[in-house]
Every structure is written in C-alpha cells, then in structure tokens.
C-alpha cells in the first residue's frame, strides 16, 4: 500500500466537500474491494475519505411501496433486516452467499453497487429489481447505472446515499459460486411485480451485469420455470476464463434462471 | 494401554499454544537493528537481463543496499543444487542447470529473483524496488511439459538440449512389448496430473543475522529440515562452514513438502546480512508464495494395463513426462522416478512393468515434492487403469482388485519395492462394509429420481514411507542418508527432554513423541518436552517429510530409550542393592524381582545425577543417551478409500456425499492425530481432484496466482469422513509404525475420479474435475450413448 491522507467525515456534507477538495480521492466504505487492490499496489489514491462513520448513510426503511436501503448498510445488516425479509425476501437472501462473516460485517451494499464488479451479487439484485440508485446529486435507474465491468454512471464527485428497491415478493437469486473466489461464476436474479418481470444476470457477461429480454418476455406470459423451456442465451458476449467458458456460462444462465423462478414461485404471498 | 501411552488419543499438547496465537513463527522473531528485504522479481517467464540500473532506487529513503546476481557471483556464493542424481537410460547424468539465488543474466520463470533491496522498513524496501530498472529482452516461453521437448521449443538452459533433464526408465521395455503383443485385454488411460500450489498457511520466511565478533551466521527460517538446509547452504552454497552457521526452524505453519527445499531467499538473506552488517528479514506475501514456492505434480502420462481372460494383470506400461519447472529444486529429480515408478505395482501382483520418465525444464516455478510426492501420481495411474480395465471387462472393480491383490509377504515387486507386510483384502473388505457398498445401487436409484447421477469410486492405494534406508537411497543417487537421530535427556528430577532431528509443522510430534516416552518410562506426558528445529541443540537430523517421523524418527527415540533404560537399570541395581539381572522395569518403577523393594523412575534419575551410590568408574554419572536409527526398508502403508459422489446434471457440480477410509498404518500412536492426518490428506487430494490447478498461459504467466483464481478446498466440500484402520505391524522398524501423513492425498484423487467416471459413464474426466469439466463429460457421454 502506498501512503495516502486519511479523512473521516461524519456527515454527508463533509464527505462531499472533502471529495471536491481532494484530487485523486477515493471513498472508503467497507474497504473489501478497495483495500485489497490498494494492498497489491494496483490502486494508489492520494486521499481516502472514509464514509463508514456517517450515520445518515445506513439503515433500512419501508417507504410506501418500496424499501430504501442506505448505501452504508452492511451485507449482514441487509441479511438480517426484518423489513427486507418481509417485503423483498429475495434481496435479503443475496448477502448470505457473499464472502465470509468478516466481509459481510464490513462490506456495504453501496460499495458493491458503486464498484460494479462483473462477478458481484448486488448488481444483479439491483438490476433485477429495477432499483433506483440515489446519490448526493440525482436519482439513477439501475438500467442506466451499470455501464460495463467496474463502470457506472457515477460522476467523480458523486456519492451513493441510498438505493430504493420496489417491493417485490416474488423474487429470488440463484448463484453458482466461483470455485475459488466465491463470487458469482454466474448469478441470476428474477423478480415479478405486477406485470413487470425482470431477469438480471451477473458473472456471465463479458460486459458486466445484464438483463435477458427473451426470458423476461416469456415469463411475462406465465411466470413459471417451464416458460423458459427451449430458451437459451447466446454464448456470444459471455465471459471466458480458466474457470468457465462462454458456452458453459450461457448454459448456467438458463439453469439458474429456471431455478430462481421456481424459488420465487415457492414463496408464500 | 496407559492413558498417555502408545495408542491413546491424547489431545495435542501444542494446540493450546497454536490456537491461542502463542506460537513463535519466523516472522514473529525480530532482531535488534533488523532490516528488511524485498525482492525484485521478473515479470516475464523467459528473458535475457541486459542490465539492472539501481541508481535511482539506491537514492530512495531507507535503502541500505541493492544487491544483484553479479555481486552474488563476485562474492562466490554458490548455486542451489538438486541433491539426488538421476542417470538417463543411456547412462548419462541428469542435466542440472545452474541455479543462482539471484538471476545471472537470464530469468527463467515469472517470479525469478533478479535483485534484492535491503532497507530500514519493508515499505521502504518495496518502494525502492519499484525504482529498480531492469532491462529485459523477452524471449518466447514454454510452459507445457508435453511441448517442452518439441523441435523449435524455446531452449531454457544451455546444458539441457530439448529442455530434457533426463530420460529415465525402469523395467525391460522389450519384455513389456512382448507382454502387450500377446495380451488378451488392454486398458489405456491418458492422464494429466495437474500442477498444484502447496499453499501452507504460513508463507515462507527467513531472518538472517551475522555476528561479526564470532564470525558466525544464524538463520531462522520456515524449514522442514533445518540440518539439511545448513548442510546445503554450507557445503554447496559455501556461505559459511557448518560450525559457523546455525539454522533454527521455529514453529512452522504447514509445509506439505514445500518447506523441505533450500530456496534462493534464505541464501540471499544470509549473504545480505553479512554484507550489510544488519539482521535481514524477508517474509513472502501470498502472491510471492504462489510465484516462488515449489509447486507439485505436473505429469503428463500415457499408461496401459494388460490382462488375461481371467482378469489377471499380465503387465503395465507407463510413459510420463514430468515438468520440473525452470530449475531443479532440492529433491525434484527423485520425485517422478524413485518415488513414483517404484510404486506402480500398487497393491497388485504385476509380473512385468516398464516405465519411462522424461523430466523437462519449462518456464514455470520449480516443481518438487508435495504431500505424497510421486506416490499420488503413481496411485492415480494404477487406480485409474484398474478401474477402466474393470469396466472394460465388465467386472466389479472390487473383484478385479481382489483377484490381483498381493496376498503373501514379503513381496518383491518388479519395480524394486519390497512390500514387507499388509492385508489388502482386509482393508478393502472393511471399507466396503463400513461404506455399505451393497446399498449403493439403491442409493443410486434414489439420486436418479431427483435427476442426479451417483457414482462410487475405489482407490486401493499403496505408498512407500518411512524414508529411508540410507544404503538403498544412496545406491539410487541420493546425496544424503535418510536415517534419523534422537537424544533422550533425563533431568535429575525425572523430567525428560527428547531431542529429535525430525521437525514438526503440524504433525503433533510434541504429543506423539511424548507418548512414546510416557509408554516406555512410565511418566506422564506433561513431564516430557520435545526439542527440535535448532542445529545448535540437535546435533544432526534429516527432518520431516515422506511420513518418516514416526517410523524413522520415533524408532531413533526408542533406541535411545533402550539405552536410557539399560543404564537406569544398572544404577537402580546399585541403589536397591540388588543384582542388575533381578531388576525389573515396569510402569515407571524399578523393582527387585520377587520383592516389594522398588524405586520410581524419577528417584533413579536423581540417583544418576547425585552419583553417590554407584561406582562412577564403572558407570558414568548422569542419564542421557543418543541414538541414530537407519531403517531396514521403506514402510508400505496401504488401504482402501471409497468415495461416493452425486452430480447435478444441469450444472455439472459434483458433491461428495460419503467417504470411507480404511488404512493400514501399522501401529498407531495416537488415533486422533492419525484421523486428523487422514482428514487433511483427503482434503488435499480432493482439492487436487475437484478444485486446484495451477494454470500458466502461453506467455508463462501464472493465471491462477491468487486465491481469487486458485480454488482451495473448503469445509463445505466435504461430508463427514468415516475413518478406520486395519493393522499389520510393520516388520521393518522396532515400533511397527508405517506412517500416515500422506495417505489421504495419495488415495483421494483416484477415488474421486473413479466415482465421477462411474457416475457419468465416460472415462475422460480431467483434474480438476470442475463443474464445467463434469458438465462437458455428462454431455459427451449422452452424445455417445445417443449415437450408439
Ligand atoms: C474475501 C472476499 C470475498 C468476497 N466475496 C464476494 C461475493 O461473493 N460476492 C460479492 O458480491 N462481493 C464479494 N466481495 C466484495 C464485497 O462484497 C465488498 O464488500 C463490496 O464489493 C464492496 O463494498 P465495500 O463497502 O467493501 O466497498 P469499498 O471497498 O470500501 O469500496 C469499493 C468501491 O466503491 C466506492 N464506494 C464505496 N461506497 C461508495 C458510495 N457510497 N458511493 C460511491 N462510491 C462508493 C469506493 O470508492 C471504491 O471504489 C468479497 C470481498 C472479499 C474481500
């Protein structure tokens, strides 16, 4: 790790100011994506702004027909939130498969969404639920937010403050773990909210998280795993690495989508 | 059996220390004035070093010195060596290329060290290392052993044409040819024994200090065999004479073979400590460990088994290319030869075996012994062949094994090993009963109902442990003898220190060795401490690897204990005023036979040191005895592992649903520790079979260079393992011990792959059998069936 100056604001305002004042500054939330790359000396921010002590950034709140989750909410807080378990159970189940207890007690949902790792789990949930990402400046629809691996719509001085998830009881996440990292080799999040059906895939795509319109159209007609029979995604544009080739990843998308739909349907309303 | 003697499941004495974080590892040790080393490593797999510019780096804060290979050569620091000479079949010696501790003009693998920065702090050393400018001319690389000898392949070392280290063989190829010509049935396999990264929990480390007053060096390092390290660094590298070099291997957090070898970093730290006049410490980070710890396995093998109509094996032919990496590591030459081909008879009577092994250089990290070393590779060949043959002949794989088992002992195999004792059918039968093999068909049908494929695989493995009779290994090319030493020091109040040349890095010697003393002297294990790992305390020893510490190390202790008992008896006779012949030693008491006159062991110990009541002209005062023990043969642990798996056809994910291991380890000192060793070994073997694989790309970059890409086994990959034993005493050592440290890693890969291929109905499943590999095999098998 290289040297850097360290700031620890306690309000969002201070954080925004610090971000504006410090060139080449990085926000630090749980640190579980940022610190490993800094330790490997692959990232060398001149300043670190630790946003983990800002109370207004964390918490889970029911607001009308959606649940608002603070960016600084840790994975374990999401997993244990009764509000989420009751209203968006599929989202509350996502963090159970993230890393280990250390990671889950430090890592944050906002950090994961901002990082947009192509194998991370939350991006699939955010896109698969049609979440809105709220920053200190604006509101961004998930469909516009994720722009390819490690790339988002965030501008340099923008901080995610919250995420707004529309309530969807019929939703589920299916993850096939990467054998080494435990991230998603492929992960599929499905949701149904009225006539809105979403299928979002992480891990598989060479360009990060994506939706599968063909699957969504079929599921819109009937939200049942059988509706996906005969459908598949193309291996073109799938990731290829030492762990899985494009064909296998494309195949897993279909398998996991079917399983996720079945899981979502198995929930009691 | 006493509560703490041989056969008791005593809790490990050392665990309190380890579990509460009170162990003392090399990196925990700091010396006054200590500086830190950071190595500049080649990012290229193969390149000429045209120049190294250290000017800018030297000016960085805290830098004490930047040293390169040129200075190393100028100071006449010798190369690292491979200590086991192998001759090719044409009689020529192996091509051992020079291995300087810092590269001399050329780098041969990514991670090869070109320079070292010594600075006040680690961060300063690392910062400065980035300013060292190395001018590389990149050369094409070769990483695949099967391609290393091809025409036009990049040449790595001048003295090794076609990158060939040796072309070795055992057996008579013409006679084997004849057997195969007339064979009724031939089973064939093409196997890749995947390259593994050892990944001990504690990374390697070295701390060197030079005392200019005494002109002596001390090295603390993560070694499984500090005396061997001292010998090599002294006699071959020429760092300092042995009496001026002390090597201390304190607590070591796992080795699995990777810490047997003498590495560049410890040589460089010693040299730098003397040059800079400051203690120098280096601790590998995990990325460095991936790039520099010797890897394991990496064989490409074609093998055939000939059988007659009755399912009797008539011959075996094996051709292996073994990848030894960029340089020959300390024992690398022996692993794919004498630790491999000599085990190809497995548990079977095989009248004719021929095995040819080509060892090659590639632009990869050196490969050397890793848990099992050669024997997992051999077992994988033999047990895959027998399974494939059984399926081909339509025979139950257990039945085919039974028909061919060696049944009378001693049994001289045609590949040099002399099996001394065993009962292979007994362990297989017991394993089959415990596993409920009979119920497998039903379980398979239940799995099928939920769309899953279920398979069962055997591995009736054998290994050669207790390395090794010195004369035998000497005749095979070893540069050292493989005896072990021990000293038993009885203190005046009756407590005991055992000094051993073995080294514990997870095996539990502090407990098991104390159990032997407790058994023999009748004192509680709390009164025994085990001293190891310091060349100033223990005179000499060969260290721990090859499951030798029980069979060889404890036999040396037993021999020393015999001497202690004999002397103590003499002294007791004087103290009890009786004839020596009338003294009986039992349960820690010396008794005059037929009387109630007795003395406790501690009383006799005190008597020995007080020396008031015996003629010191005849009997020396004190009670301390040493012994060297050289085994008469290798030991041959063997057993049967049964693995049962279930495959999710949609994803190809394999789940191990049941595992039974019945091993014959001879006499067991501590069943709980043995069970733990079996568990750990199986975990590593399953890691190899399902998860682990070191992958290089064509440019020689280690793609699986971190835990993000190198999959280690986790607890969730395992069911509860059923472990049991059968016992035939080992006749080759006084304690009847065979050794247990490697069995699991040796047995497991074949058991897993036999189970998967059984489930899938297709033999071509490579390791690691990841979900993708198995998914592809399931599809292939379906396509084949559909076409049939
Ligand atoms: C061993 C291990 C295993 C893991 N396994 C998984 C897994 O299985 N699945 C998975 O999805 N993830 C996994 N992770 C990643 C983990 O979930 C991270 O915690 C998460 O990706 C990032 O969250 P963080 O709070 O730690 O962010 P940090 O590391 O602190 O930050 C990550 C990036 O986001 C930026 N950032 C953080 N917060 C904000 C904000 N509010 N607004 C704008 N930018 C922000 C930072 O500047 C930085 O660039 C694992 C991590 C580790 C170390």
Image (spheres, coloured by chain):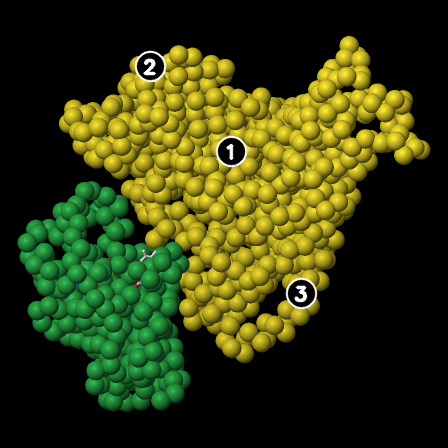
In this figure, which residue is indicated by the disc labeled 3?
B437
Note the chain letter of the yellow one.
B
* Residue B513 percent across, percent down from the top left: 65, 37
Q: Is mark 1 within 8 Å of ligand 1?
A: no
Q: Under tag 2, what secondary structure?
A: loop
What numbered label is drawn on residue B224?
1
Which of the two discs, 2 and 1, sits closer to the camera? 1
| Quarter of the render that holds ligand 1 | bottom left
Pick the residue in front: A240 or B680.
Answer: B680
Q: Under tag 1, what secondary structure?
A: loop
In this figure, which residue is indicated by the disc labeled 2?
B75
- Colour assignment, chain A: green
B233 relative to B425, above or below: above
Pick the residue in front: B431 or A56.
Answer: A56
- Residues behind callouts 2 and 1 on a single chain: yes
Is A52 positioned to the left or the right of A186 in the image?
A: left
The answer to which quarter of the image holds residue B176 is top right
Gap in Å between the C-alphas at discs 1 and 3? Answer: 40 Å
Tell me which residue sits at (68%, 58%) in the image. B431
The answer to which quarter of the image holds residue A220 is bottom left
Q: Is residue B123 visible to the viewer in this orientation of the structure?
A: yes
Chain letter of the residue beneath label 3 in the structure image: B
Is B775 positioned to the left or the right of B49 in the image?
A: right
Gap in Å between the C-alphas at discs 2 and 1? Answer: 28 Å
């Amino acid at each position: 790790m290289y040297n850097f100056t360290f700031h620890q604001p306690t309000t969002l305002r201070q954080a925004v100011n610090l971000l504006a004042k410090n060139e080449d500054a990085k926000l630090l939330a749980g640190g579980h994506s940022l610190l490993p790359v800094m330790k490997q000396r692959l990232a060398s921010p001149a300043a670190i702004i630790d946003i983990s002590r800002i109370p207004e950034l964390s918490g889970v709140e029911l607001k009308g027909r959606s649940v608002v989750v603070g960016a600084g909410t840790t994975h374990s807080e999401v997993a244990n939130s009764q509000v989420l378990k009751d209203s968006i159970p599929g989202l509350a189940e996502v963090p159970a498969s993230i890393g280990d207890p250390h990671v889950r007690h430090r890592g944050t949902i906002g950090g994961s969404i901002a990082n947009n790792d192509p194998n991370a789990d939350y991006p699939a949930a955010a896109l698969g639920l049609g979440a809105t990402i709220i920053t200190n400046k604006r509101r961004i629809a998930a469909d516009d937010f994720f722009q390819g691996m490690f790339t988002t719509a965030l501008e340099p001085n923008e901080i995610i403050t919250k995420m707004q998830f529309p309530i969807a009881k019929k939703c589920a996440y299916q993850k096939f773990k990467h054998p080494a990292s435990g991230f998603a080799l492929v992960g599929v999040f499905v949701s149904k909210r009225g006539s809105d059906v979403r299928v979002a895939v992480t891990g598989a795509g060479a360009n990060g998280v994506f939706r599968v319109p063909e699957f969504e159209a079929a599921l819109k007609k009937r939200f049942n795993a059988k509706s996906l029979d005969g459908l598949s995604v193309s291996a073109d544009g799938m990731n290829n690495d030492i762990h899985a080739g494009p064909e296998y990843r494309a195949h897993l998308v279909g398998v996991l989508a079917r399983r996720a739909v079945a899981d979502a349907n198995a929930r009691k309303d | 059996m006493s509560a703490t003697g041989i056969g008791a499941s005593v809790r490990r004495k050392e665990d309190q220390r380890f579990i509460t974080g009170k162990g003392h590892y090399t990196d925990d040790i700091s010396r006054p004035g200590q500086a830190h080393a950071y190595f500049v490593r080649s990012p290229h797999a193969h390149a000429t070093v045209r120049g190294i510019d250290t000017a800018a780096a030297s000016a960085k804060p805290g830098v004490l010195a930047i040293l390169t290979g040129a200075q190393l050569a100028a100071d006449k620091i010798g190369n690292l060596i491979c200590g086991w000479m192998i001759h090719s079949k044409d009689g020529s010696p192996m091509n051992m290329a020079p291995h300087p501790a810092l590269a001399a003009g050329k780098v041969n693998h990514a991670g090869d060290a070109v320079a070292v920065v010594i600075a006040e702090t680690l961060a300063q050393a690392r910062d400065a290392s980035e300013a060292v400018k190395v001018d590389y001319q990149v050369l094409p690389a070769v990483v695949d052993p099967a391609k290393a000898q091809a025409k036009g392949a990049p040449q790595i070392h001048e003295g090794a044409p076609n990158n060939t280290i040796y072309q070795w063989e055992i057996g008579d190829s013409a006679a084997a040819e004849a057997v195969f010509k007339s064979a009724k049935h031939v089973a064939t396999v093409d196997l890749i024994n995947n390259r593994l990264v050892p990944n001990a929990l504690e990374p390697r480390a070295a701390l060197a200090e030079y005392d200019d007053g005494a002109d002596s060096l001390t090295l603390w390092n993560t070694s499984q065999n500090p005396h061997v390290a001292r010998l090599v660094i002294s006699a071959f590298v020429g760092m300092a004479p042995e009496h001026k070099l002390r090597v201390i291997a304190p607590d070591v957090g796992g080795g699995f073979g990777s810490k047997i070898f003498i590495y560049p970093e410890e040589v460089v730290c010693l040299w730098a400590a003397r040059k800079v006049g400051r203690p120098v410490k280096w601790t590998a980070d995990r990325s460095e460990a991936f790039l520099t710890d010797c890897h394991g396995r990496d064989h490409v093998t074609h093998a055939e088994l000939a059988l007659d109509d009755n399912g009797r094996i008539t011959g075996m032919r094996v051709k292996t290319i073994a990848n030894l990496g960029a340089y020959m590591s300390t024992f690398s030459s022996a692993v794919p030869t004498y630790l491999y081909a000599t085990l190809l008879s497995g548990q079977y009577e095989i009248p004719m075996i021929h095995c040819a092994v080509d060892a090659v250089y590639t632009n990869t990290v050196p490969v050397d012994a890793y848990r099992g070393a050669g024997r997992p590779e051999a077992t994988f060949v033999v047990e895959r062949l027998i399974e494939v043959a059984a399926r081909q002949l339509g025979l139950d794989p257990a039945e085919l094994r039974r028909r061919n088992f060696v049944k009378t002992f001693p049994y001289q195999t045609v590949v040099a090993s002399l099996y001394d004792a065993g009962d292979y059918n007994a362990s297989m039968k017991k394993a089959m009963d415990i596993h409920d093999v009979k119920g497998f068909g039903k379980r398979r049908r239940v799995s099928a109902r939920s769309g899953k494929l279920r398979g069962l695989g055997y591995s009736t493995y054998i290994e050669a442990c207790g390395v090794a009779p010195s004369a035998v290994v000497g005749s095979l090319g070893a540069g050292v003898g493989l005896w072990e030493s021990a000293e038993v020091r009885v203190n005046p109040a009756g407590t005991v220190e055992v000094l051993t040349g073995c080294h514990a890095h997870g095996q539990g010697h502090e407990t098991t060795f104390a159990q032997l003393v407790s058994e023999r002297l009748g004192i509680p294990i709390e009164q025994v401490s085990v001293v190891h790992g310091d060349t100033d305390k223990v005179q000499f020893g060969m260290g721990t690897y090859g499951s030798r510490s029980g069979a060889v190390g404890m036999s040396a202790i037993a021999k020393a204990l015999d001497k202690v008992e004999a002397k103590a008896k003499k002294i007791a006779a004087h103290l009890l005023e009786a004839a020596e012949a009338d003294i009986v030693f039992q349960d820690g008491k010396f008794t005059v036979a037929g009387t109630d006159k007795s003395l406790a062991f501690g009383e006799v110990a005190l008597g020995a040191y007080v020396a008031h009541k015996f003629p010191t002209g005849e009997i020396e005062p004190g009670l301390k005895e040493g012994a060297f023990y050289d085994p008469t043969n290798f030991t041959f642990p063997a057993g049967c592992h049964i693995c049962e798996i279930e495959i999710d056809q949609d994803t190809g994910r394999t789940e191990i649903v049941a595992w039974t291991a019945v091993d014959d380890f001879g006499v067991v000192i501590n069943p709980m520790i043995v069970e733990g060793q079996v568990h750990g070994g199986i975990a590593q073997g399953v890691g190899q079979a399902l998860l682990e694989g070191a992958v290089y790309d064509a440019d020689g970059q280690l793609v699986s260079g971190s835990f993000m890409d190198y999959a280690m086994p986790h607890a969730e990959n395992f069911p509860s393992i059923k472990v049991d034993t059968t016992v035939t005493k080992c006749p080759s050592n006084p304690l009847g011990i065979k050794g247990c440290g490697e069995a699991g890693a040796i047995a497991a890969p074949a058991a897993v792959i036999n189970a998967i291929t059984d489930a899938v109905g297709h033999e071509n499943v490579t390791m690691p059998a990841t979900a993708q590999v198995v998914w592809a095999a399931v599809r292939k098998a379906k396509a084949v069936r559909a076409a049939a």
